[in-house]
Each structure stands twice: as structure tokens, then as C-alpha cells.
Image (cartoon, coloured by chain):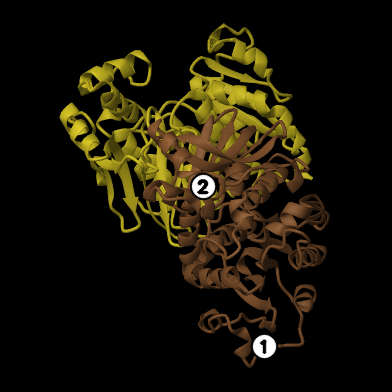
Chain colours: A yellow, B brown
């Protein structure tokens, strides 16, 4: 009866997403227990060190630290993330360090170490999945563990698990959609205010929807990364970022938006990947009554299948607790598949 | 290595849905085999008798019969559906007989017999799930088998598996949406043509989107049945059809539709179930740019959750191959959970 035992989780990268996962474990604890799922947070690691408690860390206390883990006297400053990943006693590594799109580190190393040690991995870190999905999925298979990454695409919008589980009876022909909340917010505000791109970008930056250096989002590279993940994981391709034709939203003008609007269309940054291997990101015209025509920071995906026809799903694309939702879903799916009795 | 063995399926009720499932098994065979899933159709039953072949029936030949199974010389007219369900050697019963909303039969008896015999069950038949979900899920649990019913709600739209699997990390607060394609088609056409309900209904009947006696759909009972299934399966309630406040679309006038339209709304038949136990079906105003504002025979569901916020999903609500999509997804999920190695 493995299901009766706690599922022991460690979180590496205790920033906004990692703390969101911890908070979610607390929020969902009672409901999950009622289904037989006993999640226990037994370790965390961030830049300042690690905390370990095999009996379970006090999440309420951890979250009250407001991220300043270093202040906590019980932190072990001499213990590295690798010490935790390689030596602690746990079942699932939740890897939530920030994405590095060039090297994938430190996430890539963390994930490899956990998989090699026979631990399941759930991550929100796009870098390792974009750069090394083939290698990582092979490592997971060899070690008979699961590698889950729903949070890397579309935040709370469950696109990966939807395609792989709920639509597992279908052949998926293409996936297209809005995968970047920053761009969608900017384009939505350009429609609302009739003002130019730069104005909407400034507003998005003030509200925290865009980074100080917005290049990665607005030039389409973030969307391209998510397409590579979809291509490699749902379609089994072996794509790289350089395989994606990318055009961002920086040259979309108020005039173009007005012209499209007058004809019943919105301009949206659409990423699309087809079974035939083509990957593209570009501003495209979407009919106003189309399911992909979602606004603000929402993401949307349209999955074209042979049996079900077109299935669309929409949800919040970003945010700490939304990423945590995807991570919690992955943890639950590992539990349902491997531990539930 | 159970995964290396074929998963043996029988289909009971070889009408449009049952034949759709058989056709889908043929369409998806190559792709499924490449993932290690070897589905084999070893028996079918309909009103005229049964066909059994432990080596696997010839699906291409079966489907070419155009449903007139009785013509086939190899049919066993003396073998009943229960003979097949109780005596054949198989893993999964696919139960696709028509819904009887008063007794649930013959589906209810079929499903009980299979569960008692330790077989997994996948069904598109709303009757047994509406009337006896508690009893059936208990039987499934006692016999350590799975009972799946994605096809009973929303056709190809994966609402049950989405809520139970992809959103398993969330507490679901409410589910509301459009769960009846007939009503949605009629309301859509009333907007397009500005003509009264009766006119749109006649058109829907001519196109096969509405039954000769449309009462079950247009008075909201079909939507209510689906709400009961969502309430009992996603929220763990113990609801009956009589617990649902139901108002259909027969009294929606062109004037009401015009008034709503002028204010930026569509009128849609919305079913809603909340965690607090309230269940209702009624025509409601939906903002035109809202994700639930889908048209024609499409279904849509909005799932309100604590972590992910609002997730919406849309898809085709009816049709032989769309129901088959849901059934194939359920079969795949049983395989992933129990047989995949």
C-alpha cells in the first residue's frame, strides 16, 4: 500500500513559483488527503542554502518568511542544491529555478541529477525542456521515473496533459494558440487605447506584466520556446529554437490593429506547430468570434485532432499560483499513476 | 510486461457510437501501437446477437456492414449481451447502448455485470451514470477496476478528465457551461435568422441536430443530466435529476435575443453546478467576448478553480466520432494507468 505513505517532495528554487507550490500544498492539503494523497515538503533549496526536515517542513512558517530564506536560522548555508537533490530521501523534485535559455542551468543539472537518482521530476523551467528534452526523457525512462513539465507552457492552462492524457485517443494534427501573456496584454491594450506599441509596453511594465528588458517576450522567443516544447513532447519531434520562424509584435501598428478590427478581426501573436514539422510564431488575424480570440494576459490553445475535431482550452498564462496549479497537477498525475492504491 | 499484451475490448451496443469506436480503433491503431498500446476488438453485441473472436474481429469488415450486423452470417443470434459480458475473455467493456433516463437499462445491467466480473468499463450512456454513479463507482472500487464516462458529458470536449486529471492539483469551485449542442444550434440560428424558436427547431430537425421529439434537449433535461454527472463525479455529491432547477429554451423569443444582442450579450442555455450543491439549467446572458460564447453545436465549459482561476474548454458536443474520441481517451487513460510498462 504505497498510497498510504506520504509522497515526499523537495522544491529547488524557492522564488515566486517555488513558494507558490509550497502555498498550494498547504491550500490543497485537506482535499488531497481526503483522496488518499499525503504530500509532504521535506526539503527546499535556494541560492542561500537548504532546509531539510524528513518529518515535513512547516509550510505556513516557510511562506511567512516572504522569500527571505536566508534570515531563517535553521537554514544550512553549506548545503548546496546538489547535496539536497542527491542525498535527501524524497520521491519528487519540483524544479523551479529561473529559465536560462542558453545553457538551461542550473535547472538542467538539477533535473539530470534527480532523474539519475531515480526521482520523479516536475518543473516549470523551460530551459532544460527546450534544450534537452530528448536526453532528459531518455534518462527518465532508463530510471523508470516520470518527467513532467506542464508549467513550462501556458501557465495554468493544461495543454500538455490535455493533449497527452485526455486526448490520448486522438491523433493530434496541429496545435496553435496564444502562449505569451505579455504580448497578449500589450495587443489587447493597443485595441482598447488605440495607442502605439511603446505606450502599451510601458503600461505592461508598470503593472509587472512585462520585464524591464521585454525582448524575450515581445520578439516572440518565449512563444517559440513553448512551441519547441510542444513539438518535441506532443509530436515527438527533435526541434530546436532555431527551427522556429519567429516574428514578434514590436512592429504591429495602431493602424494595422484598426484595419483588422474594422474587418472583424483581432491581431494576436500566434504560435503554431503542425504534425508536418513546421513551427512558426507571428502576429496573425483572428476572427473576433473565434475561440482563440482571448484578451488580457489569457493564453489559449487550439488542438486540431482527427476524432475530436478542434478542442480549445484557455487559462491564465502566468503568475506564481497559476504555475503552481500546473505543478500540483503534475504531482497529482504522478500520484494517480504510480502511487494510488 | 502486461503492456506487451493486447488490451482486449468488447463493444456492447453497436449503433452509431459503438461503430464510431470500432472505426477509431482502426484509425488510431498504428499510432497507438507505436506507443506500445495494442487494442484488440474481441467481441461486439447488439440487439441481433453477438460476434466473438479472441484473435480480434476484422474491424474494416465490421464497419463495412453499415450497421446491419444481422446480415452477417457469423453472428451468433442465440448469444445475448450478458453472455458476452459475463463469459468472454476481455479487459474493457465499451458500453454504448442508448440512454434510458428512467431505468438506465440495458446499460445499467451491462455495466454492473462487467464490473462484478472484474472488467473495466468505458461508457457513453448517461442513464447508468446519472441514476447509479454511487453504486457503480463502489462496485468498481470493490473489484479494483476503472469506470470511465467522459463521453457522457460534452462529447469530444474533455471535461471530466480535464477536471479529474489535468486540474487534480486544484480545488474546483464551480463548473458552468453549454452542454447541449441542439439548444446551442437553435439559439445560434435564432440570432442569425432573427426568426422564432419554432423555425430554428425545424431547421435543426431537418439537419439531424434535433430529435423528432426534441423535449429532452430543448426543455433542458439533457443538460440537467450532464450536470448531475458533473456534480456526482467531480464534486462527489449525491444528486438526482430532481435536484436540478431546470428551464429550457422553448420560451426564448426573437425579441429577447435582439435586446440581449443590442447590449452586447448572447442568450445561451447554461448549466451550472457549484461546490455548495446548487444545480441549475436556464437561458442566461453571456457577454459576446466571453469564452463561453461559442456557437453552432459547440459545447463549452468554464471550470472555476482556486489555483488556476478560470479554465475554459470547448469542443464538439455531439456526433459518433466525437463520442468515440472521448471513449478512446478513456481507454488510453486506463492503459496508461494500469497496463503501460
Horizontal and vertical percent position of residue B184:
50, 50
Which residue does the numbered mark 1 point to in the structure image? B75
Check the residue under mark 1 and report the chain it is in. B
Which quarter of the figure is the C terminus of chain B placed in?
bottom right
Where's residue A333, x and y in %?
Answer: 61, 43
Q: Nearer the viewer, residue A19 or A129?
A: A19
Q: Is residue A266 left or right of residue A336?
A: left
Badge 1: few (under 14), some or many (20 or more) residues near its Cα, within 10 Å? Answer: some
The residues tagged by marks 2 and 1 sit, at their Cα atoms, a distance apart of 39 Å
Disc 2: host chain = A
* Disc 2 secondary structure class: helix
- Identify which residue is drawn at 80% across, 49% down: B134
Look at the image and tell me whether residue B324 can be seen: yes
In the displayed structure, would residue B208 be above or below residue B271? below
- Mark 2 vs mark 1: give the one in front: 1
Picture residue at 54% right of the left edge, 17% below the top: A49
Toward the viewer: B21 or B219? B219
Look at mark 2 in the image and give the residue it sits on.
A162
Indicate whether A219 appears above or below B317.
Answer: above
Q: Please, what secondary structure does the residue beneath circle 1 have?
A: loop
Give x and y (percent) for residue A65.
58, 10
Quick one: which residue is furthest to the bottom in this view? B73
Task: Quadrant for residue A58, please give it.
Answer: top right
Amino acid at each position: 500500500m504505497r498510497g498510504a505513505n506520504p509522497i515526499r517532495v523537495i522544491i529547488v528554487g524557492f522564488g515566486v513559483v517555488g513558494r507558490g507550490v509550497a502555498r498550494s500544498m498547504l491550500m490543497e492539503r485537506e482535499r488531497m488527503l481526503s483522496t488518499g494523497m499525503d504530500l509532504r515538503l521535506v526539503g527546499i533549496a535556494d541560492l542561500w542554502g537548504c532546509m531539510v526536515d524528513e518529518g515535513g517542513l512547516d509550510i505556513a512558517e516557510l511562506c511567512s518568511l516572504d522569500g527571505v530564506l536566508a534570515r531563517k536560522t535553521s537554514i544550512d548555508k553549506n548545503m548546496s542544491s546538489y547535496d539536497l537533490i542527491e542525498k535527501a530521501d524524497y520521491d519528487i523534485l519540483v524544479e523551479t529555478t529561473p529559465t536560462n535559455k542558453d545553457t538551461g542551468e542550473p535547472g538542467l543539472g538539477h533535473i539530470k541529477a534527480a532523474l539519475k537518482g531515480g526521482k520523479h521530476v516536475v518543473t516549470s523551467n523551460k530551459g532544460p525542456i527546450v534544450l534537452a528534452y530528448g536526453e532528459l526523457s531518455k534518462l527518465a525512462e532508463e530510471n523508470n521515473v516520470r518527467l513532467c513539465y506542464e508549467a513550462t507552457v501556458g501557465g495554468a492552462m493544461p495543454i500538455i496533459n490535455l493533449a497527452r492524457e485526455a486526448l490520448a485517443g486522438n491523433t493530434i494534427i496541429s496545435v496553435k494558440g496564444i502562449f505569451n501573456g505579455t504580448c497578449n496584454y500589450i495587443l489587447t491594450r493597443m485595441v482598447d487605447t488605440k495607442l502605439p506599441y511603446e505606450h502599451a509596453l510601458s503600461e505592461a511594465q508598470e503593472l509587472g506584466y512585462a520585464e524591464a528588458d521585454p525582448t524575450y517576450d515581445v520578439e516572440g522567443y518565449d512563444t517559440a520556446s513553448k512551441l519547441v516544447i510542444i513539438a518535441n513532447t506532443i509530436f515527438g519531434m527533435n526541434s530546436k529554437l532555431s527551427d522556429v520562424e519567429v516574428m514578434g509584435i514590436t512592429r504591429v501598428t495602431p493602424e494595422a490593429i484598426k484595419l483588422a478590427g474594422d474587418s472583424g478581426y483581432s491581431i494576436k501573436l500566434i504560435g503554431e506547430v503542425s504534425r508536418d514539422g513546421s513551427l512558426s510564431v507571428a502576429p496573425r488575424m483572428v476572427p473576433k468570434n473565434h475561440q482563440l480570440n482571448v484578451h488580457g494576459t489569457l493564453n489559449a490553445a487550439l488542438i486540431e485532432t482527427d476524432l475530436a475535431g478542434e478542442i480549445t482550452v484557455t487559462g491564465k498564462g502566468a503568475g506564481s499560483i497559476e504555475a503552481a496549479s500546473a505543478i500540483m497537477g503534475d504531482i497529482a498525475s504522478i500520484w494517480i499513476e504510480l502511487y494510488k492504491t
